[in-house]
Image (cartoon, rainbow, N blue to C red):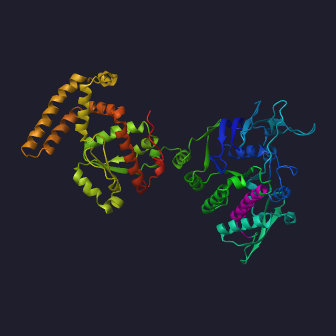
Amino acid sequence: MKKIHFNTYKKLKNIDISLSLGINAIAGGNGTCKTSILHVLGNSYQQVKSTDSRLENSDCLKVINAINYSVNPKIESLTRGDKAKNDPAPGEKGAFYTATYNDGTSLSFRKHDSRAGLKAKSRYSIKPTYKSGAKESLPAAPVIYLGLSRLVPFGEFLDDDKISNQKVSLPQKHLSAIADNFRKMTNIETVSLKPQNMGSIKKRADFTTSTEGVDSNTISAGQDNLLIILTALESLAYYHESLKSDEVSESLLLIDEIEATLHPAFQIELARIFEEYFDKFDKYGIQVVFTTHSLTLLEYLIKSRQSVIYLMDNIVDVLQMESPDMLKINMHLKQISHKDIYIDKIVPIFSEDEEARFVFRILADQLARNSTGMRQALSIFHLVKCSMGSDNLRLLFGDDAMRQSTISAICLLDGDQTEDPSKNIVALPGKNSPEKFIFDYGIDLVNRDDSFWREDTVINSGYSKPFLSKIKEPYSSLLKEAENKAAEGLEKDGYVRKQLKSLFNDNKELMKLILIRWANDDENRAELTHFYHSLHSMFLKVSKWHGIPNELWPKTEQISWT
């Protein structure tokens, strides 16, 4: 199945559920119709008949039907306990949903009154709407549905008379594959796997082991559940091998609440087994779709780039989370913002002075407009209020022990300094001290007919070219004085820097407007992008030390200029 578009089905309204060819996890809170999606998937295929021309050997169908509890179930059989005649959309007419299959074909499904006889209660089934005159039919593929009945422990089933062994079983090759995977996960060596019926509740495996006191009747519910899943998986592999060599294989394994009774380590190992099968999709053609509430499993699947569909209850309908990641999922589950999640966690940033911090705040805010990750990281960046020369900061961050333990932080130097990523050192843009770099750019705006001076924000703040021209005179005098001191062999940096800082702080609002203009000047885009990547890299390097996951500002995120 490639996609299901729901017009209306319970709370699924005008929503697309897209599926990958391999693993698909459907997650979300209670009442988000996760299980209903599994029901719809099972309803969208018909059973493969023994006369199907694609089959080389039809015996596989007898085996699959015999050893698996629910094969190609229809919605009415899965929801027979529902009230209100099983109607998933009372009062609605027309197509409930449209299924788009892997070959690109589509079928729409509507409700159908399946009442049999005049006295029978009315009950709805969901059937395709075929085009008039068209030779359409429901695609045929094996679908194995594993519902929650698979979790009933053997020890709690009291009707011994209804326990029986099946006469048919998988070929030895497939039984061995089940036993091997079960042993890898549990360290239990099974002997003589045989399919067994537990009345009308479920179908499982009967076996003995070489370990005294351990057999199919004494294993845990989780181990029993695991065997049922592995059996279903291998059943579909058997179906594939029964097809003619030139036929395309397609089958579905649907599992409700896959993590139930399974230890988190089992969940991950089971996902890895699925991946092994799906690395050979061309060989087996198995598509697995399961529901889950397991954060452990979701994190693993997201990291391994498997398909995760996360649904959110919106009272009257269901919303789908865009590009789900663990940060978004945790935020949704806890109903809090990222700032609240990491309220007691920070990433320290050391800088030379307040002017550097002023520049950082403004540039970071401009970058955050074009980067979700940067916007989220801003809430946990902590600008340490300190005044330290670049030499002292380099000495501090050059101490490996301090940098990697006590003071895992980012060092922010002025633009006239050299970056050193190995020591967590980044440099501001501008290739000069903050005050000189902004003054120089402002003067450049005076010297050219720039639209900056016609912006409403600038005009309404009382600034103009003549205003900056007045500042230009004392600024130029300071630069001239510095040159004279240098010619006389006198110390200049401290005195001039102090005077520039004073001039800068006296005109801070104008400096802010000039800096914002600089950040939005296309000519500076490359320099600002470099600063973004440098800061991003340092965040990824130090954030985990402070207990902040990289998902807050993902490694793969690139700034998107608008």
Which stretch did the figure color magenta?
A: 218-240
Q: Residue furthest front?
A: 246
The one nearer the camera, 111 or 128, is 128
When the figure is inspected, residue 514 is found, relative to residue 264, above or below; the finding is above
When the figure is inspected, residue 221 is found, relative to residue 475, above or below; the finding is below
Q: Is residue 198 left or right of residue 434?
A: right
Q: Is residue 319 left or right of residue 552?
A: right
The one nearer the camera, 451 or 378, is 451
Residue 384: percent from left, percent from top: 30, 48
Point 81% across, 44% down: residue = 76
Residue 56 found in image quarter: bottom right
Look at the image and tell me in which quarter the C terminus lies.
top left
Residue 164 found in image quarter: bottom right
| Residue 151 appears in the rendering | no
Point 43% across, 37% down: residue = 370
Residue 205 found in image quarter: bottom right
Residue 77: percent from left, percent from top: 81, 47
Q: Is residue 514 left or right of residue 173?
A: left
Residue 462: percent from left, percent from top: 26, 23
Main SS, magenta region, reads helix
When the figure is inspected, residue 460 is found, relative to residue 273, above or below; the finding is above
Point 65% across, 68% down: residue = 184
> Can residue 536 be found in the magenta stretch?
no
